[in-house]
Structures are given as structure tokens and as C-alpha cells.
Amino acid sequence: MKNKKRILTSLVVTVLLLVASISYLLLSDRDSYKYYTGLGSGLAISEDDQSLAFSYYKDGREAIYVSESNGKNAKKVTHSTKDQHRDPKFSPDGSKLLFLSRNAEGIQSLFITDQDGSNPKKLSSDAQHVSEAIFSKDGSQIYFSSMPAKDFKEWEAGTDEGFDLFSVDLDGKNLKQLTDDNRLAMESIALSPNGKEILFKDNTDLYTFNIEKEEVSFSEFTKLMPSEPFYLTLSPKRNAAAYTAVSKESKNSSLFEYELFLKNLENGEITRLTNLKKAVVSPVFFHSVDKILFLEHTNWPQDPNKFKLMTVNLDSKKMSEISLDLPASKASSVMMQAVDYTINSWTIGLLYSILLFLLTLYMKPNRVFLPSSISLSIAVLSIAASFIVAAMVDPWIGIGVGMLSVGIWLCTLASFLFAFGIKFYRKQA
């Protein structure tokens, strides 16, 4: 009788822990950047090479900072209590900054501010999701890629809408849609040397938009580039391009490594600039010296991404780290980080298995397989549900339900083995 009471008490405690853990996983913010302090992935250099702009997380809040080119006197220039600020761009005269503000739903809006952070102004509507933005050659207009926000939220489920080019004045007036192509992607946006064309990348192909004619054409520049360039950026003179690509030695390994390459667009020569055996992101050319600024992903491929700010000389390939004068973390979140680390899918699986074991012990000898059988039924139903959800709601949600069903199957198998062991033990006793 005492054993029954102990098992029943353990059952109640396990059920409470299981319900609490599932509720925490469903309701809590599982963002890997929730407590992070460190560099974001956006970089920019002013045309006089005297100032750097970048995003920086402090205790999970991302904002735009500006510093001298040597990393000294870093200053926070954007402030938000809820949205994340990233991907800064300097105006040609260096007096203004563009940046993207990302909300909790992942929608990015376009903002402009003075270099010191004063006079911030929103340039895009709430109905738009902006992916990239640049200034025109004279700094009087802004070009950006965007798609409807409601369609971006449904992007993984499939939508007919895609990205297009837009223009807007610095005061937010005269918003104009320049293309109507609904492209899968519009990345690495750059201006031609004369400022009359906009180059952009759609997956592996490059296209040119003629601003005067408002026409898009396939760019011959594509033939000059490798099949899969990432973070493509042009030199100020447009005679060279920097990009990251999978290194030759890692192509046959389980983990790709992304190194920095330089392509001479005049003679076609390709030079590998790094051999870090990690990942390089966000290369940016200096304007008056033959150097490139980039971020080294030091913990590749883990999240949150931890970066070091580096430069590489284009002639000598010598690399140097820029030490940034940035604030350290102040928040005391050790307890909450421990809770987040402890409560995960493995915790749920362990508690569910313990629940099945305890129910098996609580059952009469002729009913020890009942908990396992019920769990088996749940596993079968969850597999069927995964196909239904994938077909009618969202493929990714369906995959999530399918992964849950796999976990239930494994716990059920363990429960059946445990029941066999209990039955055998009792029979021997």
C-alpha cells in the first residue's frame, strides 16, 4: 500500500513537471540571442574611411553603433526597447545612416537617422518587409528591396509574392515601386560606378536594373563570378568583387567552411584572402586603402553567432583584428539561462518516459502493457497528424509534429521494454 502511495505521489509530481515544461517551451522566447552580448552581422564604412557603423547586441538588445575606424570611441546611436536594429549603411557624405528595424515577428522596416542617432525617421510602411537598402550616388534617394509583410510571414508555407525594388526620398516621400518581378531573393544590392544602374543577386544569378529605363536585364557580371557567391560586394571602383564561398577542402566534409575571396573583374584572377577554416561574413571594402573589413564567425556554426572584427590587406593578405571599445553585459540572467538550458525536448522526453514507467508500475500485473499501448496509439495518431498538418497548414509545422511523433515512438519503445522487464521480474518473484 505504501509503495502505491509513493508511486502515485511520484506520478502527480511527474505530471506537474511535464505540464510545466511543455508550457514553458510553448510560451517562452527560445531566441538564441535572448541573453547575447556581442557583434551583429552588419557592417559599413564611411566614404572617408574614418568611421565604422555596425550592430551590437547588449543583453539581447541589438542596436547600431558608430566608432572611429580603429574601433575607438564607439557610441550607441539607435535606441529601442523592443525592436532589433541592424544592417547600417552610410550616406555618400557620411552624415546619415540607414538601418533596418526588426520586430518580434521578423518584419524589418527601413529607418534613416543622422550619424549621431538624432532625427530618426521611418521610411517604409508597416505593410512592407525590407531586406536591404542603399543610398543613391548623390545621396538624395534610397533604393531598397521589399515584399509584403503578410506574405513574408507565410514565406515558408509558399506564396506568389516575392521581392521587388523600391525607391523613396530621404524624408519618406515619393515611395515608388520600381520592379514587379516577385523575385525569390534580392541580395547584395550595389550601384554601378555612374549610379545609373542597380546590381542585385537573385539566388546564384546577378541582374541589373536600369534606373532611367526602369528595366531589368540579366547581368554579364554573372559570368565573371563563381557559381555560388555569398555576401557579394563590389569595390569602390567596381573593378573587383569580394565574396565568401565554400572552401575547396571543405566541400566533401560534413561542415562547409566559408572563406573570403577577391575577384579581379578586369583580368578574371581570383585570390583567396583567408584560411580561417570557419566562416567569413559581411566583407566591406575600404575606399582609400587596399583593405577589406569583415567578420570572422569564431564559433561557426553555433548560435548565437560570435564575431571578431577583422581586416585583410589585399596585397599581403595580412589579417588584423580591430578591438572595439564596447559596453559589457550588465544583466544578471544566470538563473534564467540555466532554466532555458535545462528545459528542452530531451527534458520533455525524459519526463514522458518516467511517466510511462510509473504508470506501468502502478498497474495491476495483467495490465502492465496498457500505458505503452496508449502511448503507441498517440504515436500513430501524431504521425497521421504530421501529414495532415504538412498538407493543409504548413510543411514546416508538419515536420515539427513528425519529429514529435518520433520522440513519442522512442519513449513508447522504452516503455514496452520496461513493461516486459517488470512482467518478467514479477513472474520470477
Image (cartoon, grey):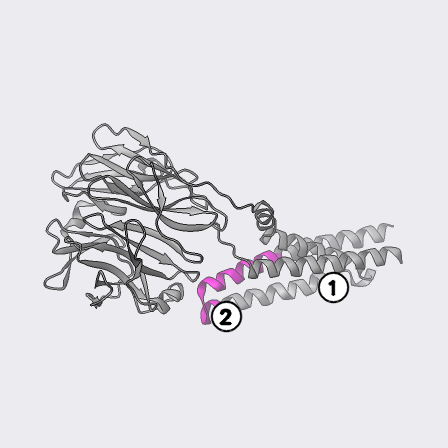
- Is 247 left, or right, of 388 in this rendering? left
Q: Secondary structure at mark 2?
A: helix
Give residue 321's mark: none
For the N terminus, the image quarter is: bottom right
Q: Secondary structure at mark 1?
A: helix
Most distant residue in the right direction: 1
Does the magenta segment cover residue 389?
Answer: yes
Find residue 2 and report its horizontal and vertical position in percent. Answer: 88, 56
Does the magenta segment cover residue 89?
Answer: no
The relative height of residue 259 versus residue 7 in the rendered view (above or below) is: above
Q: Would you call the spot at circle 2 few (<14 residues within 10 Å), some (14-19), or many (20 or more)?
A: some
- Is 37 left, or right, of 132 in this rendering? right
Q: Amino acid at mark 1?
A: Leu
Find residue 396 and report its horizontal and vertical position in percent. Answer: 45, 62
Residue plotted at (63% across, 55% down): 348
Q: Amino acid at mark 2?
A: Ile
- Of residue 75 and residue 63, the one placed in the foreground of this image is 75
Q: Which of the two discs, 1 and 2, labels the residue nearer the N terminus?
A: 1
**Residue 394: quarter of image:** bottom left
The residue range painted magenta reads 388-409
Find residue 266 and report its horizontal and vertical position in percent. Answer: 11, 40
Q: Can see residue 258?
A: no
Residue plotted at (49% across, 64% down): 398
Residue plotted at (31% across, 54% down): 118
**Residue 245: quarter of image:** top left
- Of residue 64 and residue 387, the one placed in the foreground of this image is 64
Most distant residue in the bottom direction: 392
Find residue 55 and report its horizontal and vertical position in percent. Answer: 36, 47
Residue located beneath label 1 in the image: 370
Residue located beneath label 2 in the image: 388
